[in-house]
Image (tube, rainbow, N blue to C red):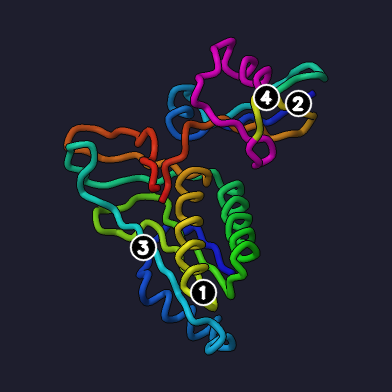
Amino acid sequence: MKIEVRSTPFAPWELLQTYEREMLGGAAGRYGATAVFVGTMRDFNEGDTVRGMSLEHYPGMTERQLEKLLADAIERWSLDDALVIHRVGDLDPADPIVLVAVWSAHRKEAFEACRHIMEELKSTVPFWKKERLAEGTRWVEKNRPGY
Amino acid sequence: MTVQVKFFASLKEQMGCDGATVEIGEVATAADVWLQASGGKALPANVLVAINMEYADQNHPVKSGDEVAFFPPVTGG
């Protein structure tokens, strides 16, 4: 299990390859399903062009919530492993914001757990987005429901 | 008793600071801490409360040394 809140850009697909090779090598053959979600920054929202974004978080609580979320999902769906990476700080359009990956024996558990982790993250983990528009900035007030 | 108060995101901007050390009576809830820290402002309906980094109801009691955080709905991911 790995969680990381990072203030620098990351490359989700390269990171996944490295993680599978270095951390999951011993489990190869045991898991038959990998489900991955990558969230990237859009250049539009609410009808406006968005030029950039700042992501604030609550250091300490963020990590605690993410660890609990992953540990609960690993137990509930009997996952082989789970990983979440989330950006904070200043982002540009197309920058990856979040990576969720889960590994399990079968696809049902992988799909369900990946979706669950992402939806819980969006509604409970203390991150806040502030958008940079052509004129000024504005806070994103709420996430739209994913289900 | 003394508790540490934290504000985040838009609430931090509205309050003009990221937190404060608050002196309050021995029997107090998170809502009482808010009133003390905000100078008597009503707690906005959508504000979330965490005590020692765990979500809590605004009527949850606090104890000396607690970290009580107030913040708007979360918007990560």
For marks 1 and 3, give the one nearer the viewer.
1
Q: CA distance from mark 2 to mark 4?
A: 6 Å
Q: What element does badge 1 sit on?
A: strand
Looking at the rendered structure, whether the residues under marks 2 and 4 are on a common chain is answered as yes
Q: What element does badge 4 sit on?
A: helix
Q: Residue A4: horizontal and vertical position, in percent?
A: 52, 62
Reading the image, the residue beneath label 3 is: A38
Name the N-terminal-most of marks 1 and 3: 3
Reading the image, the residue beneath label 1 is: A103
Q: CA distance from mark 1 to mark 4?
A: 40 Å
For marks 1 and 4, give the one nearer the viewer.
1
**A115 versus A28 height, above or below:** above
Reading the image, the residue beneath label 4 is: B30
The answer to whether the residues at label 1 and label 2 have Cβ atoms under 8 Å apart is no
Q: Residues within 10 Å of mark 4 (few under 14, many from 20)?
A: many
Q: Residues within 10 Å of mark 2 (few under 14, many from 20)?
A: some
Report which quarter residue A10 is drawn in.
bottom left
Reading the image, the residue beneath label 2 is: B61
Q: Residue B46: horizontal and vertical position, in percent?
A: 49, 26
- Residue at (56, 49) in percent of width and height: A62
